[in-house]
């Protein structure tokens, strides 16, 4: 009783254990879940240690360790699991010894390989709040004010994209019959949800037919007189479209990829011809998909033209703006997304250039009633006109991650995002210019956003690249060398860029090139850091040549 009383007053130590190492007493196990534990001195000490471990990781001067990942496996092979309880203190020591030292330092200004962003300090604190308060956004009764936060955040991004009059938002933001946006745990789930909505709207209820959601794809296609259903978009659209096709009964073979031009933007003429062929073949085009920032090189499709093509054909137009949505905050670069306001649905990914934690994304819907075609109900919740957000979400129980989006747009603000976006694109242009100035490198794609593609070219083959006489055997040798450079850079851990494969014309030949891929998204990255990444790659080339 005395221990319980101390806990309630915030003075106890947790958890209580008996004389056996790490074994909870009944009371100690209960205390572990006590609300008073949050206020206890013991847990405040643990929290400080966690923060200390985080700080030591992000202040590390390197991106990673030089340890071979295969050598770390020995620490993570036991699968039986401990029968006796491990104290929190012991588990923290385990993390400090075996996990944190070998994690990737995403905060390093020389970590320029992937789209996951660094986080502002307030996001760390608010993530603890979201986890600790544990609101369930599937149901209003389990979230209340957090549900209102999510609706308001959806309204903010809807207005950013579509810019409807004020009275539209006054009417729809908190209406139980309207959904302006659906939170998702990533851009992939947002894209899948958008195409789920597109399918159901295209093959919905009609003349006694219950719709594809009830009857299935085969019955829906037969009812509407279609031979098949397809999804159409750029050759460079995200692989989540393939996942959507598989899950929605369309099939990955029916994802129609349109060739791109020399700027890696979808070819509008070829898009029109592909749609015409689908109509002639009685194939139902469920959606036309535009990309506002491809993952390969950051290119932006001609959204205005794509929107016109989709509208003229009466087709759902979805824009995957997971990477490029942040450009909407920038007066200097917003025009690159002209036409996005024509989209029926838009994917926004918070964990990329909006500087939010992983798992924070949103699907924004032009029509507040669009999500009704995917609504689900249950007797114990999600009843008609309940306003429960889970009615239109592919996920069931989910946390209040919308608080992080809500916080970011208020704390960073429109002008703050504009500064971040403009600086990212300026640094990408700087890196592209630096690559052009170095004879060792070839710039493969001028940045449309803030991804730079380039490659190292050995001196004996540079004349072939410059003259456009590069052939497959020589190109293969260059590809192999760039794979070695990127792998060695990752293993060394001093700096980091990722890699991809793109196509480029050399004379009449179109070759597949291994490209080094730098993603300029860290506000802490300087011009000196960019130069250091290139210098590190040249050092690695020297080491490779010496070994050869």
Image (tube, rainbow, N blue to C red):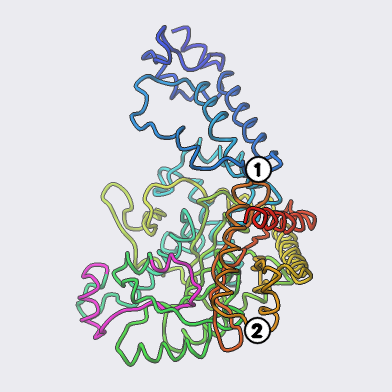
The residue at which mark 1 appears reads as 122
Q: Are marks 2 and 1 in contact (CB under 8 Å)?
A: no
Q: Residues within 10 Å of mark 1 (few under 14, many from 20)?
A: few
- Taking the image as shown, residue 203 lies to the left or right of residue 298, namely left
Which residue is painted at 45% across and 61% down in the image? 188
| Mark 1: secondary structure | helix
In this view of the protein, can residue 327 be seen by the observer?
A: no
Write the residue at 62% across / 78% down: 338
Looking at the image, which is closer to me, 65 or 522? 65
The residue range painted magenta reads 213-242
Q: Residue at x 54, y 59 (%)?
A: 349
Q: Secondary structure at mark 2?
A: loop
Q: Is residue 216 above or below residue 543?
A: below
Residue 371's place in the image compared with 523, above or below, is: below
Residue 136 figure quarter: top left
Within 10 Å of disc 2 (Cα), the crowding (few <14, some 14-19, many 20+) is some
Q: Is residue 349 above or below residue 311?
A: above
- Asked if the magenta segment contains residue 52, the reply would be no
Q: Is residue 229 magenta?
A: yes
Q: Quadrant of the N terminus?
A: top left
Which residue was labeled with disc 2?
Answer: 468
Counting from the top left corner in percent of width and height, residue 124 is at 61, 41
- The answer to whether residue 323 is seen in the rendering is yes
Q: Quadrant of the C terminus?
A: bottom right
Of the pair 261 and 347, the residue shown nearer to us: 261
Image depth: mark 2 or mark 1 in front: 2
Q: Looking at the image, is mark 2 or mark 1 earlier in the sequence?
A: 1
Q: Position of residue 494 (x, y in %)?
A: 68, 47
């Amino acid at each position: 009783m005395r221990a319980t009383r101390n806990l309630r007053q915030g003075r106890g130590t947790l958890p209580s254990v008996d004389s056996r190492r790490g074994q909870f007493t009944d009371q100690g196990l209960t205390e572990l879940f006590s609300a008073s534990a949050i206020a206890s001195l013991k847990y405040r000490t643990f929290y400080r240690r966690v923060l200390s471990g985080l700080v030591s990781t992000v202040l590390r001067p390197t991106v990673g360790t030089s340890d071979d990942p295969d050598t770390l496996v020995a620490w993570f092979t036991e699968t039986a699991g401990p029968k006796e309880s491990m104290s929190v203190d012991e588990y923290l020591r385990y993390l400090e010894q075996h996990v944190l030292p070998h994690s990737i330092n995403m905060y390093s200004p020389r970590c320029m390989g992937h789209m996951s962003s660094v986080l502002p300090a307030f996001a760390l604190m608010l993530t603890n709040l979201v986890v600790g308060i544990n609101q369930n956004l599937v149901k209003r009764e389990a979230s209340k004010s957090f549900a209102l936060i999510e609706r308001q955040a959806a309204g903010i991004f809807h207005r950013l994209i579509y810019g409807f009059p004020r009275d539209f938002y006054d009417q729809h933001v908190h209406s139980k019959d309207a959904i302006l946006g659906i939170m998702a745990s990533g851009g992939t789930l947002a894209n899948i949800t958008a195409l789920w909505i597109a399918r159901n709207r295209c093959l919905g209820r009609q003349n006694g037919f219950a719709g594809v959601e009830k009857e299935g794809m085969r019955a829906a296609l037969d009812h509407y007189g279609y031979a098949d259903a397809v999804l159409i978009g750029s050759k460079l659209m995200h692989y989540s479209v393939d996942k959507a096709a598989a899950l929605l009964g369309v099939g990955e073979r029916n994802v129609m990829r349109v060739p791109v031009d020399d700027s890696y933007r979808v070819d509008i003429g070829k898009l029109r011809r592909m749609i015409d062929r689908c109509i002639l073949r009685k194939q139902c085009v469920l959606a036309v998909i535009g990309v506002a920032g491809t993952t390969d090189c950051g290119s932006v499709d001609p959204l205005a033209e794509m929107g016109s093509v989709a509208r003229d054909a009466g087709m759902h137009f979805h824009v995957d703006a997971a990477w490029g949505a942040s450009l909407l905050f920038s007066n200097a670069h917003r025009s690159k997304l002209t036409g996005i306001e024509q989209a029926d649905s838009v994917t926004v990914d918070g964990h990329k250039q909006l500087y939010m934690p992983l798992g924070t994304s949103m699907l924004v819907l032009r029509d507040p009633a669009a999500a009704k075609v995917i609504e689900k109900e249950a007797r114990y919740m999600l009843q008609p006109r309940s306003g429960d957000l889970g009615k239109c979400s592919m996920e069931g129980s989910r946390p209040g991650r919308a608080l992080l989006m809500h916080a970011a747009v208020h704390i960073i603000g429109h002008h703050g995002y504009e500064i971040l976006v403009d600086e990212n694109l300026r640094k990408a242009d700087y890196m592209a210019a630096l690559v052009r100035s170095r004879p060792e490198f070839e710039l493969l794609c001028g940045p449309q956003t803030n991804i730079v593609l380039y490659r190292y070219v050995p001196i004996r083959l540079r004349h072939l690249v410059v003259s456009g006489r590069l052939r497959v055997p020589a190109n293969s040798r260059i590809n192999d060398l760039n794979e070695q450079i990127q792998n060695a850079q990752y293993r060394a851990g001093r700096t980091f860029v990722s890699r991809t494969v793109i196509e480029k014309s050399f004379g009449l030949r179109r070759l597949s090139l291994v490209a080094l891929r730098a993603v300029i998204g860290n506000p802490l990255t300087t011009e000196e850091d960019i130069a250091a990444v290139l210098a590190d790659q040249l050092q690695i080339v020297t080491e490779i040549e010496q070994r050869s």
